[in-house]
Amino acid sequence: MRLESFLLMRHEILLTVALLIILIAELSTENKKKISNLSVILFLGVTVIGFLPVPEGLLFGEMYRTSHLIVLMKNILNIGTLILFFQSAEWIKQTEYKNKVSEFYMLILSTLIGMNFMISSGHFIMFYIGLELATIPIAALAAYDRLKNISAEAGIKLILSSALSTGIMLYGISMLYGTVGSLYFSDMAGANLNTPLQTLAFIFFFAGMGFKISLVPFHLWTADVYEGAPINVSSYLSVISKGAAVFTLTIILYTVFYSIMPMWKNLLYVVAILTMTVGNLFALRQQNLKRFLAFSSVAQAGFILLGIIDGSGLGMASVVYFVLIYIFTNLGAFGVVSAISVASGKEHIDDYNGLYKTNPKLSLLLMLALFSLAGIPPVAGFFGKFFLFTAAAHSGYFWLVFIAVINATISLYYYLLVVKAMFINKNENPIAYFKSAFTTKVGLLLCVFGIFAIGLLSPVYEFIRMFSNIL
Amino acid sequence: MDFLTLFVVVPVLTIIAIVFTKNMKQTRLVAAVGMGIQLLLAVALVFMYLAERKAGNTSEMLFSHSYVWFESLNIKYNIGVDGISVAMILLTGIVVFTGVFASWTVEYLSREFFISLIFLSTGVFGFFISLDLFTMFLFYEVAVIPMYLLIGIWGTGPKEYSAMKLTLMLMGASALLLVGILGIYFNSNAGGGELTFSILEISKVHIPMAAQRMFFPMTFIGFGVLGALFPFHTWSPDGHASAPTAVSMLHAGVLMKLGGYGAFRVAIFLLPDAAKEMSWFFLILTGTSVVYGAFGAIFQKDLKYINAYSSVSHCGLVLFAILMMNRAALNGAVLQMLSHGLMTALFFALIGMIYGRTHTRMINKLGGLMKVMPILAVSYVIAGLANLGLPGLSGFVAEMTIFFGSFQYTDVFHRVLTISVAASIVITAVYILRVVGKILYGPIVNKEFLKLDDAHWYERLSTGLLIVGIAGIGIAPLWLSDMINESLSPIMHQLLNVIVK
Amino acid sequence: MIDFSFTILIPLLPLLLFFVLGLTSGKMKPVLSGYIGTLGMFATAAMSYFVAFQYFFNRPAGAEAFEKIVPFNTVWLNLTDKLHIDLGVLLDPISVMMLVVITTVSLMVHLYSMGYMKGETGYSRFYAFLSLFSFSMLGLVLAPNIFQMYICWELVGVSSYLLISFYYEKPAAVSAGKKAFIVTRFADLGFLIGILILSYISGTFDFVSMTDPQGALITQGTPLTFMGLSALTWALALIFVGGAGKSAMFPLHIWLPDAMEGPTPVSALIHAATMVVAGVYLVARLFPLYYFGAPDVLTIVAYTGGFTSLFAAIIACVQTDIKRVLAFSTMSQIGYMMLALGVSGYGENHGLGFTASMFHLFTHAMFKALLFLGAGAIIHAVHTNNMNEMGGLRKYLPITHITFLIACLTISGIPPFSGFFSKDEILAAAFENNKILFFVEWAVAGITAFYMFRLYFNVFWGKNTNYKHTPHESPLTMTLPLMILAFASMVSELIPFSKLVTSDGLVLHIQTEWIIVIPSVLVGATGIVLAWLFYKKESAIPDKLVTTFATTYKWSFNKFYMDELYLFITKKIIFKRISQPIAWFDRNVVDASMNGIAWVTNKMSDSIKGLQSGQLQKYGYVFISGVIILAFTFVYVWFK
Amino acid sequence: MSIHEIMFFLFAGMIILFSILTVTSRRILRAATYLLFVLISTSGIYFMLNYQFLAAVQLTLYAGGIVVIIIFSILLTSHINHRFEKIELKKSIFTIIAVAAGAILSISTILSYNFNTKVLVTENPDMQLIGTSLLSYGKNGYVLPFEVISILLLAAMFGSIVIAKKEKSK
Amino acid sequence: MLSQIPLSYFLIVSTLMFFIGVYGFLTRKNLITILMSVELILNSVNINFVAFNRYLYPEQLQGHFFALFVIAVAAAEAAVAIAIIISVYRKFMNIDVERVDTMKH
């Protein structure tokens, strides 16, 4: 193993280095603002370097593998995290968090490392550790807010649910190990997996992933955790964490479980319908915006399954593309909610009545983001959804697509409720006008850019599509 | 930059310009100028189109351009026009332009209003120039969604409810549509070629019958809902009633035409075999629409409801004619779209103006307006007469073409349907005259009305332009009808093939 | 033979006037628009006379039959591969005759209205509408094809509507206009469907080729049948429905009496002389087709005409509104014309009914316009329509009186006035063909004389009523038309109709049949005498009669409750039983089911909210159950 | 019955018994103790299967480490003498149904699968093998997870700190 | 001999243990006892890995190492979980799982 080959895993290495630098900085300075700025700048560097081209390859005896697609996925996650950092800069400056700035960044970075390893894993051990590394610190982050009861509640709900799901998943993995004899992905992909026990094991495994992605019926933690956790953590959970899990699930389904594709297609069919429908039905009745976005993200996960279900390069491309769009979109929505929450402490839909009068730009951005989530052109969400549906239709699942679009219509209903609150409803005391900080603005503007550009500029999709073929 | 793309670019530029305006006066001026340019473009397009045809260009679509957009999915930004789209673009140009003037006095959030309005029109223009199912669908949705804001913010009455209902029903319909489009797409390689969204290419492919059977109802209903197909029309009365003037105009005048145009260009053109096979069922539905809408209108008390039901009836006629699938009926369908577009726009414009003055739309609270605002009242009578199919106005031309086209079938089923549909013209007369009699004629019911003034210059401009359009089609329909007729050849070719098989 | 292509100007000139007057309405001085309208009409009339003269009397030597000339024709709209709608001009004896009738009466009415409408608001609007009507009516009669006729048919309908509702502030006028339009429109639906069928089987709209007795349609007929009758029969019957609607034949007549709410000159022009005879004209236009293609329908035409003439005459006897009396009289007279067509044969001397019908149409136009204009002058003078409030007017309105008397004598069929000749021909035609109808018509002639002179005596004789303002004779603009029309009524028998207007264009030879002439004159005279007895002075006889025939009187007075029947159908059936339920259905079933979807969704959302209980262990339970159910399903179902 | 069998049934019995006790005991400290017994029995199984290293790790890290912090936390948060209320019958029945269904499904599926048991190599893997595997970066080398888990532990540490950290002077 | 004990015995034991753990997770009221149930679950999985490794694939030590890492991760997880539990205790003044339900529906 040559030293250059470490270049292959530069994402993880760079992140680790950044993590350590922040740790050292934390030890050497009291100035939290500096740490914050340092972290953002460091991460900016990491993100930029991540885009430099590198070859594909395997490392550590197939423990770690990387390809252009995987690098792309990691870059997508990096971009999302970068935007999130911009958006959280203002939030983290609040007094109640003042002494935990560096921990926030370190925990986020460590989960990101976990996710990167998870995506790159070539062995179930790496996958498992990556998964845990991507989960445990988030639980800590969910309980980050010392002053709020719900924050602790969110933390405990997340970590215990995740422990249960991991346990179930591990049981599945152990059965797979018992039947195949190896935990290497490549070995498992070559083995016969079409027996009842392996089906059972697969479903146990799938449940664990379903937990991460918030698929029904494994989603129940989602809303409570999103509501209780600090808003930027919810944002991170709903976007980056979910995105990483989607990537991982797609890769594993497409490689490891390729041989039992007919089976998991059926499974996804059922779960997709459940997820979209239940997510929507719950989202309908929400009044708290964070909770609202939580259920909306459950529903979105259901849509993503429509891309995965295709099982070909087309499906992969549509999933990656959608997640990319979803990151910008949902970060936009969360970003606005976060900015308003920081400025006024309000998170209720009714509080948003008449928001357009006082904060037109934020309202417009939130509207754009919601429309993108609903899949309304010309914003990117439309393209994302359309390609997901195309992927599902490619496999002949026309009725599934139909159900999905009907669900998209239901989702439009509740997104419009928020739009209605901001633009139509009258309010005596709307949230007062406030000026957002520079970093927040940058974070939000990036989202606007993404929401418009990713859809209309076809090279983005073509780029993803190009790499998705070589899976 | 090719000519047709200007139809999308100009509205977008107008929107950008509006963003930088300072007050309502500037805003509306910019909007008027932008949409005026758009109207001129549309007129120019008509002349260019006719000149090109005269010069002997016989290709199916003129001015067509194709730019690869999403290469791997073979999605193209593919545009082009035939006589039908040219006609629809002209219609849209007129209605949008007059719509701007009809909303001349919108003060509340005027910038946002005009932006939404023009954004909507962008979608409509884009829809009519599209030759690619994907872009077509995209523009379709672009056109639908601003409706929510336009009705929700600037509407009247139970506006939130109506706006929501309208949006959701139309979006629900687009669910069917989307599946239909994807279904067509994934069957477009039946002839051995590659998958494509291009309408022209798909039209040359014979899509397998099983697929046609599945996707024809989807696309037809999908578009049909926008064309107020019974029993999916209920968004229309509420939506129209709550919408502000210009929005009602645009919606009934143009947006509902998207349904007819789409059903024609996608459902019938691309899936002709299934269309033939299943037309009987939808003919019954649309026939019901026509009669039902007309009867429904008789009983209404709100002017806008009357018009909305009347639109259900007339748009039902469009779909009915489309399903008849012969040259004359299709020609009539397009004419009816134009005619209905103009006259409904005129109707809604006038209702808006009357409402703006009297603050009521209830026919029992209105009366004797002819005395107070003769210009508006006369315009209203003209719109009404056009609606009931008076010769010399556009409605007559369209209806007659449809009836004669539909009557070409020799079997009892089609004839009975045609005759029952034709009977609706009597019912139309009943409700139109009822309204005219109640609100315009008779003694003035409210002393307050005496203080009201007649049409202002901008109102005269918009109603005048629409009346010119209505009378223009009504008096000299030949060029228009021939332009459309010529463009029907490809689809007739398709349909004839079906009969041969 | 001269080039007739300028005839297109005859309808176009009024159209131009309509646009000019309509657009300048309210801006131009009213008087000026009166002058413009009248002058324009004068020009039109002059052209028409010129055409008539050229057509009838300046024929190439040796021509036997009158030709059908189409001097102008242009495609207006292509419908199907075969069918195209043309606009153009067709000159043949009946259309040329109609040109004369229409322009004459129209000119008279234009002139008359300058006095009658003076000072009315909407004076220029009135002239604009008159021009519109003239255009439509001229277009109708000149139509070379049935579709142009239909177009103009609709346009005269709307002009009629607009003019009836001219006093739009009067609710009665508004509803009368509405009624007129809707009833005729309903009939027009029949016309339209008739055209649909006819054009389908003949492949053309063209009158000339359609009515050619040697043409394919007549000689070959059509194999299509429906419910035992040939398609042609259906088509013609439906077309007749259209004609019956316009011409106020029973039972589609109910609009006509109400239409009297319009200004009196309008009643004279539209509802007496021209538009209402359009139905007659239509049947005459298609006469060969009726005669050869569907003789059954022709019988229906005859009976409809006969019945209507009797029915309307009876009602006219008891009406008190002078315009209504005239309206029913019009119906009755049109019934005559229809009947004449119905009993007519084709070609040579069999075409007597046809010629008689056209002749009567002509004379009727003159004397009925005269009657209406005279009535207008009376109303103008006493400001009421009710003849019970009039009396002794002969002193105040001498010219009106004389002309009115002439008109009454004409309509009563007293020689030597023109009505006598035309009615006589009709009776002769009926006598040849159908004795029952002959006797009916003979009786109606007597009733006609009775009710006309009832009117005459009531208005001009009888006791002097005390008028608020002393009635005075109308200005010259009004009396001049009266005099002209009176003159026309007296002398129009001099026009050799039997030579000019015949069913096949050839000369018709008429012999005077004394067996018909004498009874008809006698019955007319009897009617006059009766009226003289009853109404010349105060008399108790009418009241006695009323009490004797109380029920008949009541039914007759209420027009046999036809209006009530229609009201029942429209209000109770269409409005209450169809429209209202549909409106209800739409809101409460169709719409509610759409809302129901939303409601169900919300309910579902509500009912599953327990899933999200906030209890970590319940979450876990769902999770585990989900895994187990999925696993069970896939392990057991997938592998079975 | 061989010594192995006796050992197995002993450990298995203990595991099942103490597991049940762990999840049913109404005194929390006792539950913790039972958990300890389960963990020890498990390590017994590992010994029996001749994985001494793993058994040792189990004893030290699991039984020694985790149970100890659990007990600490119990002491911090509960009264020692506190007895839990009984579980609702409904809840417990429903849970038992679900759990039993799951267990039956799993076990029946497992039993239906034909594991082709190989010739057992019963010797304890060489300590050296374990060590080199752990640090090898080739196939079957575990240096990467080994390194990553250090980050995990670091992150867990931060996590705990974040939660526990108090605000600075206000 | 070890071979006298079939592999399935181990699997049955571990499965039972697994579901007992699940039962505990779903019924215990105290957050710490729930955590203990989680440990049971993880342990049962470890038995699986080890037994499979020994019986079926003794040439490699994949199962063995997996178990090892599971233990390590379990420790980290337990640490964070306990930290959160203590935090919950501080705010709710008890650690009854049924009372930690302020967010619902």
Image (spheres, coloured by chain):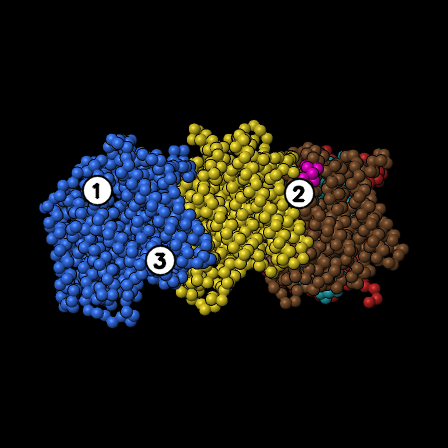
Amino acid identity at mark 3: Met
Can marks 1 and 3 be said to lie on one chain? yes
| Label pair 1/3, CB-CB below 8 angstroms | no
Q: Colour of chain B?
A: yellow
Sequence-first tag of 1 and 3: 3
Distance of label 2 from label 1 (alpha carbons): 83 Å
The amino acid at mark 1 is: Pro
Question: Which residue is label 3 attached to?
Answer: C114
Question: Which colour is chain E painted?
Answer: cyan
Q: Colour of chain C?
A: blue
- What residue is pinned by disc 1? C496
Residue C298 belongs to the span the image colors magenta: no
Q: Is residue B459 above or below residue C638?
A: below
User: In the rendered image, which residue does mark 2 sit on?
Assistant: A456
Disc 3 with disc 2 on a shared chain: no
Q: CA distance from mark 1 to mark 3?
A: 33 Å
Mark 1 crowd level (few <14, some 14–19, many ≥20, 10 Å Cα): few
Viewer-side residue, C82 vs E69: C82
Q: CA distance from mark 3 to mark 2?
A: 70 Å
